[in-house]
Image (spheres, rainbow, N blue to C red):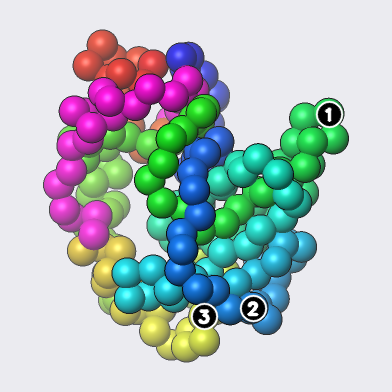
């Protein structure tokens, strides 16, 4: 295991790369979804029925899976040109760079800008999260988050509802300290010096991902 600190926030970089997992058994239909902010994707797009919702995913390449997960307000398109490179893999090995997943055995894991408990967030970040509500929608229409959502969502006018849901989710407490202690995968933790949480959280003794 190891830790890497960079000199800027990594909130817009890969949320997690390297999860080895098994695909769900849900039936999926072909998608006609187009690319959006961040660049068009070249994967095979489908929808899977998962826990009562339609989960969109894409598969690029073939072979041993490499699952790439974006953050809660992101989309596949935000990975841009990284996806073809990840699908190619080392030494020309073909990989699946995105797809549906379920809990399975993980060979290697990379977590980027990911706290394991809510109290790790800095006070400034918690204060910002408290302001995420539908009332902020109008002021965010010039920002990449809205532009990405509007380019993909069938009903862009529902953006305020999305902000309300994100805001409510961020208010919920969480602490996965005990759960991550059971992770057996070789893990790389990447955090920024000016990230959502202080650098100490990424390397503290209580955190097994270090």
Q: Is residue 106 magenta?
A: no
- For image coordinates 56% across by 46% down, the residue present is 67
Question: Secondary structure under badge 2?
Answer: strand
Name the residue beneath numbered marker 2: 30
Question: Residue 176 vs residue 2: left or right?
Answer: left
- For image coordinates 48% across by 14% down, the residue present is 2
Residue 165 higher or lower than 203, as above or below:
below
Question: Residue 20 vs residue 103: left or right?
Answer: right
Residue 162 location, x and y as percent?
35, 73
- For image coordinates 60% across by 72% down, the residue present is 46
Q: CA distance from mark 2 to mark 3?
A: 17 Å
Question: Residue 99 vs residue 113: left or right?
Answer: right
Name the residue beneath numbered marker 1: 91
Name the residue beneath numbered marker 3: 153
Q: Front-most of 103 and 115? A: 103
Q: Residues within 10 Å of mark 1 (few under 14, many from 20)?
A: few
Furthest residue in direction top, as rendered:
205
- Front disc: 3 or 1: 1
Q: Residues within 10 Å of mark 2 (few under 14, many from 20)?
A: few
What residue range appears in magenta? 169-194
Quadrant in which residue 160 is drawn: bottom left
- Front disc: 2 or 3: 2
């Amino acid at each position: 295991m190891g830790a890497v600190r960079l000199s800027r926030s990594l909130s817009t970089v890969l949320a997690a790369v390297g999860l080895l997992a098994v695909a769900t058994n849900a039936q999926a239909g072909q998608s006609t979804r187009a690319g959006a902010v961040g660049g068009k994707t070249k994967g095979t797009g489908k929808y899977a029925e998962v826990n009562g919702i339609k989960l969109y995913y894409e598969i690029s390449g073939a072979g041993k899976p490499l699952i790439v997960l974006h953050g809660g307000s992101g989309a596949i398109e935000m990975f841009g040109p990284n996806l073809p490179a990840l699908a190619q893999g080392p030494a020309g090995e073909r990989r699946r760079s995105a797809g549906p997943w379920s809990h399975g055995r993980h060979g290697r894991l990379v977590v980027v800008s990911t706290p394991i408990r809510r109290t790790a967030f800095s006070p400034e970040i918690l204060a910002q999260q408290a302001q995420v509500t539908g009332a902020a929608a109008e002021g965010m229409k010039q920002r990449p988050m809205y532009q990405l959502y509007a380019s993909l969502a069938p009903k862009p006018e529902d953006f305020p509802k999305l902000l309300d849901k994100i805001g409510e989710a961020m208010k919920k407490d969480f602490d996965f300290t005990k759960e991550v202690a059971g992770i057996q995968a070789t893990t790389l933790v990447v955090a920024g010096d000016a990230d959502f949480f202080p650098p100490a959280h990424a390397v503290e003794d209580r955190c097994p991902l270090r």
